[in-house]
Amino acid sequence: MPADLHDTITQRLRAVGQRYTPGRRQLVDRLASAPRPVTIAELLDGGARVPQSSAYRNLAVLEQAGVVHRIVTSDDFARFELAEDLTEHHHHLICAVCGGVEDFTAPPGLERTLLRVAGEVAGAAGFTTPTHRLDLIGTCPSCA
């Protein structure tokens, strides 16, 4: 993980009056190494040595600072990932049965089409869209 990622996060936290504590850094490191959006339980099982109550509070602060993105699914557990502008542009496959989330990158042609359609829809509503997100909701292979 590039060192400038931590510098960027430090700046974002300062902008909302917060510090980049060791516990927050552990959560960020775990999110950066996760292959997909993860639940708090998965974060804690994955080696983050942060009490569960602190993890919830720290993730809320990281989300407020624009470092973490929360994905709400059909189950009882939100998933978390680093904000897209800190990683790379991608979309999600969300299982409506188990709530699992997988990342996917759209082929360039589809991405261009998404940008064009999003711009048309937003423009017709007088809305500006600096970014977009596509969540496909369906059934994963395990639940099918």
Image: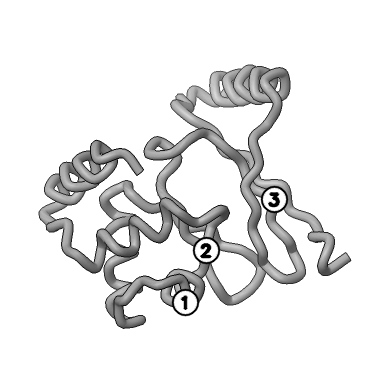
- The residue furthest right is 144
Give the number of the mark in front: 2 or 3: 2
Badge 1 crowding class, 10 Å Cα cut-off, few under 14, some 14 to 19, many 20 or more, is: few
Q: Which residue is mark 2?
A: 38
Q: Amino acid at mark 3?
A: Leu
Mark carried by residue 97: none
Q: Amino acid at mark 2?
A: Val
**Distance between the Cα atoms at labels 2 and 3?**
13 Å
Q: Position of residue 32 (x, y in %)?
A: 42, 51
Q: Which residue is mark 1?
A: 45
Rendered residue at 88%/65% (across/down): 144
Residue 119 picture quarter: top right
Q: Earlier in the sequence, mark 2 or mark 3?
A: 2
Contact between marks 1 and 3 (CB within 8 A): the answer is no
**Distance between the Cα atoms at labels 1 and 2?**
11 Å
Residue 17 picture quarter: bottom left
Rendered residue at 31%/39% (across/down): 2
Q: Which residue is mark 3?
A: 93
Badge 3 crowding class, 10 Å Cα cut-off, few under 14, some 14 to 19, many 20 or more, is: some
Q: Earlier in the sequence, mark 1 or mark 2?
A: 2
Q: Name the secondary structure under disc 1.
A: helix
Q: Position of residue 135 (x, y in %)?
A: 65, 46
**Distance between the Cα atoms at labels 1 and 3?**
23 Å
> Which residue occupies the foreground of this view, 14 or 6?
6
